[in-house]
Amino acid sequence: MITASQLERLANCPGSFRAPGFSHTSIAAQQGTENHARIEDGTRVAWRSDAQREIAYVIQTDTWTVTRLGESRGRDYGISKERELIDVGCTVDAEVWFEGSDVEIRDFKSRRRVTSAARNWQVRIQALAVWLYYQLPVIAGLYYLDNDEEDVHTFSEFDHLATQQDLRRVLTALSVEPGELATGPWCEYCPAATACPAQRQELLGILDHVDIEATFRLMTDAEVARAINAAKRFEAIVDRIKTSGRYQVMARGGIDIGNERRLEMVLSQRQSLDSKAMSARLTELGEDMDLYRRVTKFSRMQEVKK
């Protein structure tokens, strides 16, 4: 089954469609589902209070028709194995229909900034589904839950036609076996990343040097940037392995690792000063909190706009 959230990865790495673990739900997807559940049950207000939440659609790409499945379906799109390269599912996080006018939709993101709404595969597919269903102009965008920032685009008919062409191209590429594997930012949330031959090959290519520091000094800027981006993906994969391992140790009540040793979850705690309570107490005593602050300077690598 193909969903809108997978399409950026599939467009760049069609081979991941047949990779082991592709159909598994990633931890990031589970966290996203939990965030949406909090919004749906009212414990987190996001965007408009009059919006419908979690509307599921299925696009039939052989006829360019769409089925609106309704609210709160989770990932149950009812797509059969025979139509997995024909039908595409998507869920609109929030939707408001203005009769005879237009439809506005939003896709919620927790914190991390992603591709802009106008070029974002997930938003484009959601906008296409809503346009096919209502036959009305669609205003679609991203809504960031950390600070209520919005990234919005008004999709024209030409935008939707371009999405149809791009989607047809991706589905055609997926029908070719085994499919090309390509590494990139889209790998971060791929459930198959830990078993991906392309990831392993890239990692071995970086490690295949006796003196990594000397090798980096000879690299061009583009080569250094590529290595750094690859390292970020490897860190994400390692974190996923550790997190998955913690869940299994917790679920199984411990795991034997040989040599008469086990991994177990041990409850621990640590103490730290309550800065809010300290600030309140110092204010009460007429003391200036700034007198007790210590500034530590450090450098960190960060992406910035040119």
Image (tube, rainbow, N blue to C red):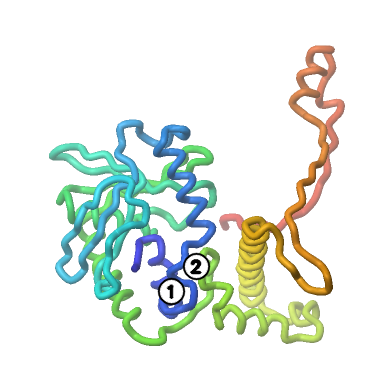
Q: Residue at x 57, y 58 (%)?
A: 306
Q: Quadrant of residue 12?
A: bottom left
Q: Residue at x 64, y 60 (%)?
A: 252
Decide which of 210, 261 is in the foreground and name it.
Answer: 261
In the rendered view, would you say 228 is above or below 31?
A: below
Compared across the picture, whether 301 is left or right of 67 comes to: right
Give the residue at mark 1: 12
- The numbered dot on residue 107 is none
In the rendered view, would you say 243 is above or below 180?
A: above
Compared across the picture, whether 257 is left or right of 33 comes to: right
The amino acid type of the residue labelled 2 equals Trp
Residue 174 x/y as whole percent:
35, 79
Residue 169 x/y as whole percent:
29, 76
Give the residue at mark 2: 186
The crowding category of the residue bearing disc 1, from other C-alpha atoms within 10 Å (few below 14, some 14 to 19, many at least 20), is: some
Verify CB contact (< 8 Å) between mark 2 and mark 1: yes
Residue 145 x/y as whole percent:
49, 41
The amino acid type of the residue labelled 1 equals Asn
Q: Secondary structure at mark 2?
A: helix
Q: Residue at x 29, y 48 (%)?
A: 55
Residue 213 x/y as whole percent:
79, 77
Decide which of 297, 259 is in the foreground and name it.
Answer: 259
Compared across the picture, whether 275 is left or right of 98 comes to: right
